[in-house]
Image (cartoon, grey):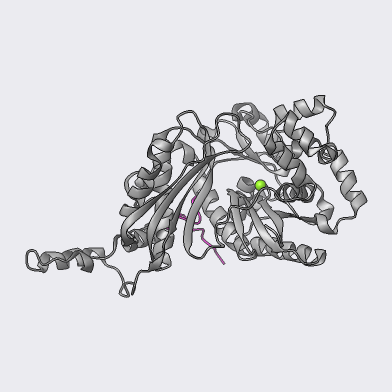
Amino acid sequence: MSGHLFALVDVNNFYVSCERVFDPGLEGRPVVVLSNNDGCVVARSAEAKALGIRTGAPWFKLAPLAEQQGLVARSSNYELYGDMSARAMEVIGRFGAWQEIYSIDESFLGLPDGDATAAVEAARTVREAVRRHVGLPVCVGVASSKTLAKFANHVAKNNPGFGGVCSLGSMPAEQLRRLQERLPATEVWGVGRRSGEKLEGLGISTVADLRDADPAWIRRKFSVVLQRTVLELNGTPCIPPIDERADAHQIMFSRSFSQPVGSAAEMREVMAVYAQSAASRLASRGLRASVVTAFAGTSRFAAGPASNPTVSVPLAAPTDDPIEIVRAAVNALGGRVAPDAAYARAGVVLSGLTPAGAPLQQELDLFSALAADHDSPAGAACPDEAPQLSEVLGRVKSRFGQTSIGLGRGGLSEPAAWSMRRQFSSPKFTTEWKDLPLVRG
Ligand SMILES: [Mg+2]
């Protein structure tokens, strides 16, 4: 995207940081978050990493030592993390010309390509805003390509002297060279272990080596994907942002999955849930959509077949009816889901937007509306006078929580595997009224 710098905003130790927002006693202590059934470690605080605890370590092996090491374990609370993510992403999005939410805790942001000092200032502002408004610590890497922004973020995260912000544009060339010579090529975004081994065999072991490799030769030896990586390391942006906001004429809900989605049945669940989120956004903006587009994609770095289906379905008439939108999204991908592909992300886009007209002004009362229908003469109940379904769903959710009501598979109170499971977790501080933290004077 010309005219813009790429910022990568990434929450530090995301799961642990979410736990610390509501339990500040965890600050400075070694903390791990466990997988479902408290099986093994999925996230670690810096202090836990310093103790040598590895991701994937089984809890039953750590538990006997936990007390003497002061180690605290938390079950994963994905509802809390998901909601904190949405809050952080919303704040981050305020500061960019565009935003691409890359994963639950990472977001690319377009910053104006002005002078280097301005970029650092903008990055600091984002960092402070997320800390102040959401309570989460983030690091920001700024550079002229996505791959370099990832690298800059890595530098910011691992070198406390940077104060959480690293902008390559304002870094002396000599310092940049030293950093790139120190870091193994496998730390570069998109370079996996297997490519790393092959590169090593060809004498390319550091980020600097890869940056200096001949792009055409890399393409012949590896792939066009790794060639792009080399170009990106040299500051030529080749991986454009997937824009969620730039177009005011569409509403998009898309996410990367916690684990790959492989079956058509699972993809229908994903579509049902994402379409409902998109439909709530539509309703909250007082709009109707006339086209539903569903898409899914495999990771550009994953092994296995690549599959990136996109299907648009025109609706009979502009609507904000979540049932119609969900049905269209669920059916859209239909036979386009490749049976042996491991999908990494998917999304639903609503377009052809028109104003929905005057929204309901009065406080919604589902039961009095139903009672009124009963009182009216037979056959006189007009569907247009019934409260709109999207409004009912929105209000029930805001009053009783996200899982209180939903359509079809979106109404599952037990999350599906791709959406993650949980067993013994901290309260859903931000999404359940009953779990709202109490503040005592
Ligand atoms: Mg992170």
Q: How many callouts does the rendering have?
A: 0
Decide whether residue 433 is among the magenta residues.
yes
The spot of residue 51 in percent (x, y) is: 75, 35
Give the position of the N terminus as an image quadrant: bottom right
Q: Which residue is depicted at the point 52% across and 36% down?
A: 307
**Where does the magenta region start and end?**
426-441
- Give the side of residue 248 with respect to residue 407, left or right: right
Residue 126 is drawn in which quadrant?
Answer: bottom right
Compare residues 178 and 126 and report the one nearer the observer: 178
Residue 117 is drawn in which quadrant?
Answer: bottom right
Q: Which residue is depicted at the point 57% across and 62% down?
A: 246
In the rendered image, the residue lying farthest to the top is 201
In the rendered image, the residue lying farthest to the left is 378
Whether 434 is drawn above or below 418: the answer is: below
Q: Which residue is depicted at the point 67% across and 39% down?
A: 71
The spot of residue 12 in percent (x, y) is: 68, 49
Compare residues 143 and 425 and report the one nearer the observer: 143
Residue 151 visible (yes or no): yes
The spot of residue 320 in percent (x, y) is: 35, 61
Whether 223 is drawn above or below 280: the answer is: above
Residue 279 is drawn in which quadrant?
Answer: bottom left
Compare residues 314 and 118 and report the one nearer the observer: 314
Residue 47 visible (yes or no): no
Give the position of the C terminus as an image quadrant: bottom right
Decide whether residue 423 is among the magenta residues.
no
In the rendered image, the residue lying farthest to the right is 174
- Give the side of residue 298 with respect to residue 232, left or right: left
The spot of residue 22 in percent (x, y) is: 58, 54
Question: Which SS does the magenta portion mostly show?
Answer: loop
- Give the side of residue 334 with respect to residue 151, left or right: left
